[in-house]
Amino acid sequence: MYRLEEPTRPGEVRPGGRTARVRSAVLTAVVDELLDHGYASFAMDRVSARAGVGRTTLYRRWGSPSALVRDLLQSIAEQTMPIPDTGSVEEDLRIITQALLEAHLDQRLQATIQGIIAAAGCAPEIDEALRTFFQSRATEAAVVITRAVERGELPPGTDGVDIFRMLAAPLCFRLLVSREPVDQAVADRTAAVILHAARTGLFTTPDAQ
Amino acid sequence: MYRLEEPTRPGEVRPGGRTARVRSAVLTAVVDELLDHGYASFAMDRVSARAGVGRTTLYRRWGSPSALVRDLLQSIAEQTMPIPDTGSVEEDLRIITQALLEAHLDQRLQATIQGIIAAAGCAPEIDEALRTFFQSRATEAAVVITRAVERGELPPGTDGVDIFRMLAAPLCFRLLVSREPVDQAVADRTAAVILHAARTGLFTTPDAQ
DNA sequence: AACAAACGGGACACGACGTTCCGTTAGACT
DNA sequence: AGTCTAACGGAACGTCGTGTCCCGTTTGTT
């Protein structure tokens, strides 16, 4: 009756100092764990040992492996993504594709992505978090296309979100599905194919705007 | 000294009858397990119970969850993929894309794919099996492009394998990464984009053939 | 300096793992 | 049809990670 405030989850009252240190130590430990065990044989024990943190703390603040991975995704989402604005779609897309390529060449990011994907396969909260993550990223990047349309570089009604999806798909496909290495040539060809299709009007949605 | 023959893994000496029945029961149980637990909380116990098979049998014939998933992938690889030959690339690609779309709309296949991807993230044998699986599938499907080139529908040197990869990528991307629903429109647009790029010569490899 | 938020460590029951031993079922071949 | 044995089924066991509890200690905040 007198408890009007929320029961305060640990880490919310004193977000700075030790709390933040523990979170960062734990999150890097999660990536390490994903690197050499994968999400399937993810062990809370080892994570706590790696992070130099009490096992109890993990269960108190996160409670489950999926919550840890969810927080890892959250920490990635917190990092802002630079949106280029060079005045040329071709150059803008090249920069975005380059960033995607570099992300796919990073060992730790590869393990992180694979871990998140694996976790999303059996934890609905992560499935949802992943959906909204990509939705917001794609929406942000779509500005590049909007500007290109305004400049007259692309036909009106071009769907920027869909372009971004199809730009990212081939790299992710190689990382996750076909398991082939990615390189500059793959990234360049993808960008060329998408841009060419966009100019021809294959990405226009009739009812958009 | 007298043991010249291989130690014979169980199931190799009497491949028919009960052995085959057990394998099929186990593989469908594996899919069921992936469906409502995912690879991350995959339990050998439950699989044996679902399949109505002794736990010992699972460990004797497969030995690990990853080996079970590997066999599941193997059983998919054993099913032949129909390669269309209508005389028109556009129609051929439409048929292939349609098959891919239907695969992505099947609940059990979705769970299977996600399970295999998750397993590949932490089991090198599955990573390898997945790589060769897609390599052979893409190579088979590439015949469609070869024929189109011979008919003069596509420029010489067009890389059929790469076309197949980029055709499959957006559907897989939505299933695994962006977690958006797939539909006919997505499939059609993908096919249109790829075909258009192929006709323009964006998929030609200079040194091919 | 004082209060409490947040952490650390030990202990515990539980469930799944992976193995071993041994008895039972059912292909395969005469 | 009968025999041999490949392959299966079930029980038991030690091990490991899980998830939770209790209680003492550290540390951010005021």
Image (cartoon, coloured by chain):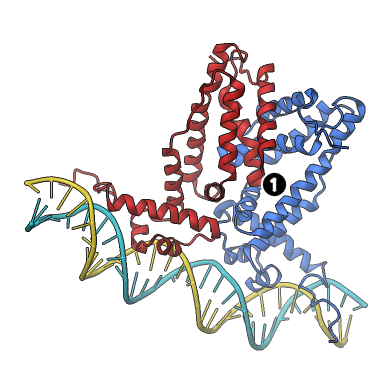
Chain colours: A blue, B red, C yellow, D cyan
Q: Is residue A145 above or below residue C3?
A: above
Which residue in the protein does label 1 denote? B180
Does residue D18 appear left or right of residue A144 in this picture? left
Q: Which corner quadrant of the image does residue B6 belong to?
A: top left
**Which residue appears at 87% of the width and 34% of the height?**
A146
Say left or right for A195 vs A5. left
Total residue callouts: 1
In terms of secondary structure, where does tag 1 sit? loop
Q: Is residue A196 above or below residue D28?
A: above
* Viewer can see residue B39: no
In depth, the one of C30 and B162 nearer the eye is C30
**Is residue A59 in view from this perspective?**
yes
User: Which of the pair A101/B82 is nearer the observer?
Assistant: B82
Report the front residue among A116 and A12: A116
Residue in the image at 89% along x and 33% along y? A147
Q: Residue at x 65, y 48 (%)?
A: A113
From the viewer's perspective, tell me whether residue B34 is left or right of residue A170.
Answer: left
Q: Position of residue A73 (x, y in %)?
A: 72, 54
Q: Amino acid at mark 1?
A: Glu
Residue A141 placement (x, y as % from top left): 82, 39
Dot 1 falls on which chain?
B
Q: Nearer the viewer, residue B108 or D29?
A: B108
